[in-house]
Amino acid sequence: MKIPTSGRWPRFALRRAARLLVSLWVLVTAAFLMIHLVPGDPVRAALGPTAPADLVLARKQELGLLEPLWRQYVTFLRHLLSGELGVSISSRLPVGETIAQRLPASAQLAAAAFLLAVAVAVPVGVVMATLTRRGRGRRTELAFTSTNVVIGAIPDFLLGVGLVYLLAVQTHLFPVAGRDGLDSYVLPVLALAIGPAAVLSRIVRVEMLAVLETDYVRTARAKRLTSLRVHLVHALPNAVTATLTLGGLLLSSLVAGTVLVENVFAWPGLGSSIVSSIVAKDYPMVQGTVLVYGAGVLLVNTLVDVVLALLDPRSAIGES
């Protein structure tokens, strides 16, 4: 693939880099202010109402909460740039160490769900576009659209609960919870992938319907090319831009969606960690986890923008 070399490409790269840096700064600032905007005393809340006053004071001093706000912010930024995310109030372990241990489990879950959603949505969308083209298959279109709307509206954690009941409690086909072996991935991955697959397949169908009516597809048909070649070689690559855009947004939502699904399946990832940290009022741990989730979403969105620019330079790079 040829990378654009005109003057617009450097401007595009600078614009995206600036947007990413500003977004990261807003995220970091919001995470810093989180512990200061919480009503009451976060350290007292974390240690409990019966904790001695000298212990609370010592923990505040350890966390740097007795310094002026601006100095705390500068210290927070300096530690962040050096890779330090603080120390957990509950476990007394470095936040970065805990995140490093749990992040791979969450990343694997989100990546597997995304790949499954794309692998299902693209062929289903192409087939449905072929079956419902030019007003054909009205009943098929109605059934497909209605099913998509219903499935897409169900929260992933409710899907997870239903899958556990049907495929684990009733039939014992898969483990109820935990992360032990490949079969333990099936239910949480399905819970995360079903909704995005439904939404993405609907978008693929709409894009394919539009592409199938273009002049170059009609020309390809006039050359008596096989239907499979017309759809896969001429139509599908040109319908991938909008699909890729939505796919990137879905990947971002999958990263955030792992929080509730991990708790349904007792998955040892960041999702279960952040929920337990919120319950325990372990704000340094919550801060670090929010930063990791937010940075992950921003990086995914930036990566999608770059890929779109490479696939369609005129629409992506040429935007104002």
Image (cartoon, rainbow, N blue to C red):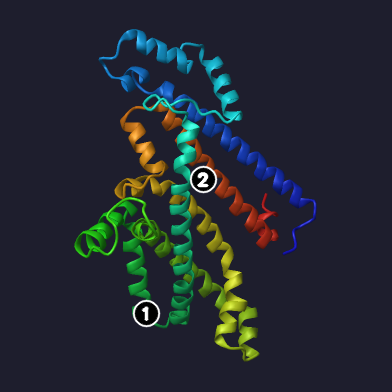
Q: How many marks?
A: 2
Residue at far top of view: 54
Q: Which residue is mark 1?
A: 138
Find the distance from the CA under tag 1 to the CA under tag 2. 38 Å
User: Residue 33's x, y, as percent?
Assistant: 47, 25
Q: Residue at x 56, y 20 (%)?
A: 75
Q: Nearer the viewer, residue 260 or 198?
A: 260
Outermost residue on the right side: it is 6
Q: What residue type is disc 2 on?
A: Val
In this orientation, does residue 65 appear? no
User: Disc 1 vs disc 2: Cβ atoms closer than 8 Å?
Assistant: no
Which sits in the foreground, 2 or 319? 2
Q: Secondary structure at mark 1?
A: helix
Q: Secondary structure at mark 2?
A: helix
Q: Is residue 199 left or right of residue 19?
A: left
The image quarter containing residue 70 is top right
Which three-letter amino acid code belongs to the residue tagged 1? Arg
Q: In this rendering, would 75 be left or right of 285? A: right
Residue 182 drawn above or below residue 230: above
Q: Position of residue 126 (x, y in %)?
A: 49, 75
Whole-percent x, y for residue 315 in the image = 66, 59
Task: Note whether 253 is above or below 123 in the view shown.
Answer: above
Q: Is residue 173 visible?
A: yes
- Label 1: how many residues lie within 10 Å, few (<14), some (14-19) or many (20+)? few
Looking at the image, tell me whether mark 1 or mark 2 is earlier in sequence order. 1
Query: In the image, is 93 to the left or to the right of 157?
Result: right
Q: Which mark is residue 62?
A: none
Residue under pointer 2: 297
